[in-house]
Image (tube, grey):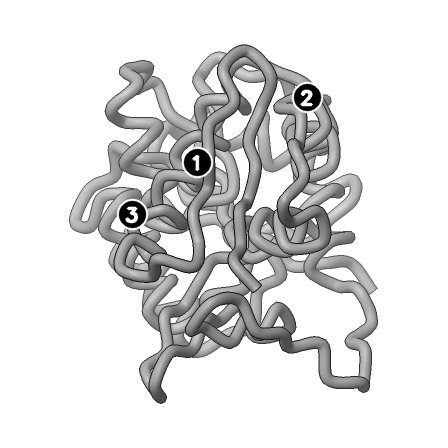
Amino acid sequence: MKKRLLYVEDDNTLAFLTADNLEQYYEVVHFTNGKDAFEAFKSEDFDLCVLDVMLPEMDGFELAAAIRERNVAVPIIFLSAKTLKEDRIKGLKLGADDYLVKPYSIEELILKIEVFLQRSQKTPVVKDTSCTIGSFTFDPDNYALIKYGETTQLTERESALLKLFIDNKNTILKREKILTALWGTDDYFMGRSMDVFISRLRKIFKDDDAIRIENIPRIGFKLVVKE
């Protein structure tokens, strides 16, 4: 059975070309505005969302935020003509997994979709995979950090990044190793995305003296955890 994609794009020509290519591999449900797309998301099941940013009625950023309130796991990819770094950062902070700038390569888009679908559809492990880090309990299966009963919800990418840090705690991780492990490529723009996720993790841990993510200049990062 084909995976279902929610595709939201108000440029009919671009939407036709993109959907025509994607439909060779996926079931594509296309909308031209964010409001109708969100109504569909609330009532139907989708495996991945591909969103334009500049949409009528509800823009892509608003749509992504609304989707994340209902589902923290479904992968989200932005496709946008907005090229400013601030726009990319905003999209990633809202919980998107990637941000491609128009004009984009269909081959690259399909590759990214495949990576995110494979990652999100892995068979769940029955055993308890939670662990303690400082005053937090990290639950990677549910993308959550719990402290004194309060839960901070992570995105799938943030959770994968934190797990990589924990698996290599108190050890320097090179930037290229993190990028290859999580994004499959050592790319400049992916590096900027990684910096956004690390910044968010630092904010979550800022009041816990037992945890810090150190920047190792020109090399990478180290998660320092006091036992």
CA gap, disc 2 and disc 1: 23 Å
Q: Amino acid at mark 3?
A: Asn
> What residue sits right under mark 2 in the picture?
176
Q: Which is more N-terminal, label 2 or label 3?
A: 3
Dividing the image into 4 quarters, which one contains the N terminus? bottom right
Depth order, front residue of 107/144 = 144
Q: In the image, which is nearer the foreground, mark 3 or mark 2?
A: 2
Q: Position of residue 38 (x, y in %)?
A: 34, 63
Residue that mark 3 sits on? 33
Residue type, mark 1 in image: Phe
The residue beneath circle 1 is 78
- Picture quadrant of residue 86: top left
Callout 1 touching callout 3 (CB < 8 Å): no
Locate the C terminus by quadrant: bottom right
Q: Residues within 10 Å of mark 3 (few under 14, many from 20)?
A: many
Of the pair 34 and 140, the residue shown nearer to us: 140
Asked if residue 7 lies left or right of residue 149, the reply is: right
